Image (tube, helix red, strand yellow):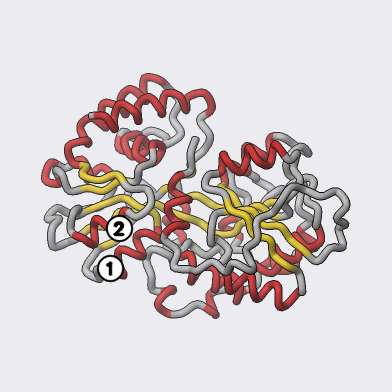
Amino acid sequence: MLKKRFKALIILLAVSVIGSTFVGCGKSNTSKTSTEKVVNIYTWANYVPANVVKDFEKKTGIKVNYSNFSTNEAMLSKLQASKGGTYDVIICADYMVQIMAKQKNVLLQPIDKATIPNYKNIDKAYLGQYYDKTNKYSVPYSLGSEMIVYNPDKVKIDIKGISDLWDPSLKGSEVLLEDSRSVIGMALTKLGYSINETDPAKLARAKAELTKLRANIKVFDADTPMTSLINGDTNIGVMWGSQASAAIKGNKKFKIVYPKEGMQFEEDNLVMPINAPHKANALKFINFVLEGKASSDITTSIEYININTAAKQFMPQSVLNNKAIYIPKDEFNKAKHLQDVGSSSKVYDSIWSEFKQQ
């Protein structure tokens, strides 16, 4: 199951990569000791902003080796191949934490929160989630959420939720994420089913709903769905928060809607592989990104939802007022969380393939 939406969000970040700092990690060298002033980070490109990396290096004297992956699945394959070694800290999606944590003491090691003083800064609303209920293996980093963005000059119906996207007046005017779970999840949501549905009969009904929706869709775009909205090629779309933020910056008339059915949230987390070569440095890095200033800098750059109570005092007012970044807590209480659907992923793939060919 691909995680294209996270790849899409990272591509949008207006952050330049500093070549001298972001050095790819090679294979694990068993001769290296835990006292080496190095920490190996593995996540999406630019997901830890360059200025945050620089600040950490300056404060601690620990060099950051930054490697990036495009999907959670690619990361998992590499971690399995290295038997939980090579990397010290990985930032990945919630459902992948769930998958890796099931392989107890094989891929991930428990994180000692007593060694992370800034753990107290994490908003308790984001702790104890389905994928790691005691946060034994994970520390929240940020959240992404899907929302609707539309041009009120072109869309004349009242947009309140996902089900409105089936309205005939929207024919040929929509941009959706090129992501099977996102789009099929919309149909499941319209029907009142779980976005993680595995019942074949319910998935068949969702497939039929997608056939009805197809005429309304003009563009599929996982990376830059806001572009077609800004250019006027489409009038309404479903996208992730950082993309919605970029859309609003492109046209201040655009409106953001939190779907009445509930938003799809995904929480990215910091985890430590079982054989992390620089465990002490990993803990220092995790503690650093949980500092209020560092967390604020991260959110300002990547425009994901912030999970840190100490960050708000450092936030620019423009970020605090951004509906794509600071979302009311009651929306999180209605959140839908994507989870692994096991063997049913083949059914999702089949539905998606047929849908795209219509």
Considering only vertical position in the picture, is 75 above or below 145? Answer: above
Quickly name the residue at label 1. Answer: 250
Q: How dense is the environment of label 2, judged by Cα within 10 Å: few (below 14), some, or many (20 and up)?
A: many
**In the image, is 270 to the left or to the right of 356?**
right
> Which residue appears farthest toward the top when viewing the image?
201
The residues tagged by marks 1 and 2 sit, at their Cα atoms, a distance apart of 8 Å
Q: How dense is the environment of label 1, judged by Cα within 10 Å: few (below 14), some, or many (20 and up)?
A: some
Q: Secondary structure at mark 2?
A: helix
Residue 312 location in percent, x, y?
A: 53, 75
For image coordinates 88% across by 57% down, the residue present is 33
**Pointers 1 and 2 in contact (CB under 8 A)?**
yes
For image coordinates 71% across by 57% down, the residue present is 40
Q: Which three-letter amino acid code belongs to the residue tagged 1? A: Gly
* Of residues 13 and 129, the one drawn nearer to the viewer in this rendering: 13
Q: Secondary structure at mark 1?
A: helix
For image coordinates 64% across by 74% down, the residue present is 54
Q: Which mark is residue 176?
A: none
Residue 255 in which image quadrant: bottom left
Considering only vertical position in the picture, is 311 above or below 271? Answer: below
Q: Which mark is residue 226?
A: 2
Q: Which three-letter amino acid code belongs to the residue tagged 2? A: Met
On the question of residue 269 being in view, the answer is no
N-terminal of the pair, mark 1 or mark 2, is: 2
Residue 113 location in percent, x, y?
A: 76, 59
Quadrant (top left/top right/bottom left/bottom right) for the C terminus = top left
Residue 53 location in percent, x, y?
A: 63, 69
On the question of residue 25 being in view, the answer is yes
* Of residues 205 and 182, the one drawn nearer to the viewer in this rendering: 182
